[in-house]
Image (cartoon, rainbow, N blue to C red):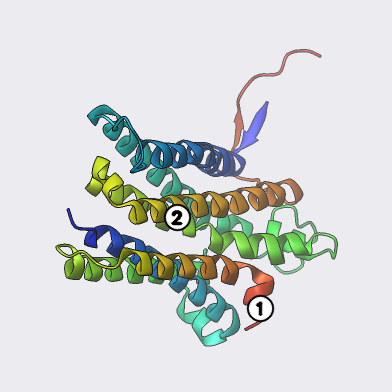
Amino acid sequence: MEITSRGLWTAIHGIGFGALYLLACSGAVVELWRRYSPKVLVAASASDEAFLRTYLVVMTLLAWYAVLSGAYVIYPWYRASPPPGMVGLAGYPQRLLMSSSTTVVWHSLGMEWKEHVAWLTPISITMACVVFLKYGRRIKDHPQLRDTVVCFVVVSFVAAGIAGFFGAMLNKNAPVEGGHTIRLVHGGHP
Amino acid sequence: MTNGSGVAAVLAAGIGAFTLAVLAVATDHIVALQRLMVFYKPTGPLSGVTTASILIWLAVWVGLDLRWRHRTVPGGRTSIIALTLLGLSLMLTFPPFGDLF
């Protein structure tokens, strides 16, 4: 079982950071909505508050790691130009997608959307995290602020979902591969 | 505790998101801007669009926070503006919509 170094980076970006962020979103939305509602009968405790603070900090880090690894590690490999006369485009995913009418839209819509919309995620969750770090349990005294923060977290989920979906489909149609080959498990005899 | 800091953060996030979307559309259409936005060559114009947007977002955030941190500001109206900007950002980053401009 082998993976190339570029394939590993792509997996870390998409699954390690991106998918983990998507999974974490529901927890943040539910926690903010239910536990910090002005109508809640049992107030959140100090340990609940500390938990959500840590949770949002981790989500913020995941979002930034995802966009930064995407834009500065994987995207350069994706958009690399082949040398003149190159026939096989497997090592040049963007050019491979653009070489056929059946795959070009994965780039012109998928990547062109994903590369920008993904950045709404770290902007939104950083704001939500800082607001909660500042207000903590007192956010329930500011219901409009809390509601808006929840909306931003929901939009961050939508943006990350769009980026994640197209990332997966782009990698399916034109995988980012190359670099060193890492052997994960030695194969046995069939 | 006043709501000023929180509202500042929300509005700044809306402005930051909208700035990114507008810069992305403008860079796609203006060749001179494409060249200007190449901060890191392997990443191309995306490096400049995102870096400039983040810097503008953070500067607006700091400015609004300094102005509002000890005040109670109209949260409802500001939230609507911030959410509208966020919604417009989502739309503008969608290539068929961005290409209308």
Cα–Cα span, label 2 and label 1: 25 Å
- Residue A79 visible from this viewpoint: no
- Give the side of residue A182 with respect to residue A89, left or right: left
Which mark is on residue B99?
Answer: 1
- The disc labelled 1 sits on which kind of residue? Asp
What residue is pinned by disc 2?
Answer: A152
Residue at 83% from the left image edge and 63% from the top image edge? A100
In percent of the image, x 24 and y 47: which residue is there? A135
Q: Secondary structure at mark 1?
A: loop
Residue type for callout 2: Phe
Kind of element beneath mark 2: helix
How far across and down, in percent of the image, does residue A68 sit? 45, 53
Left or right of A24 on screen, residue B16: left
Q: Nearer the viewer, residue A106 or A181?
A: A106
Chain on which label 2 sits: A
| Residue neighbourhood size for the residue with mark 1, other residues' Cα within 10 Å, grouped as few (<14), some (14–19), many (≥20) | few
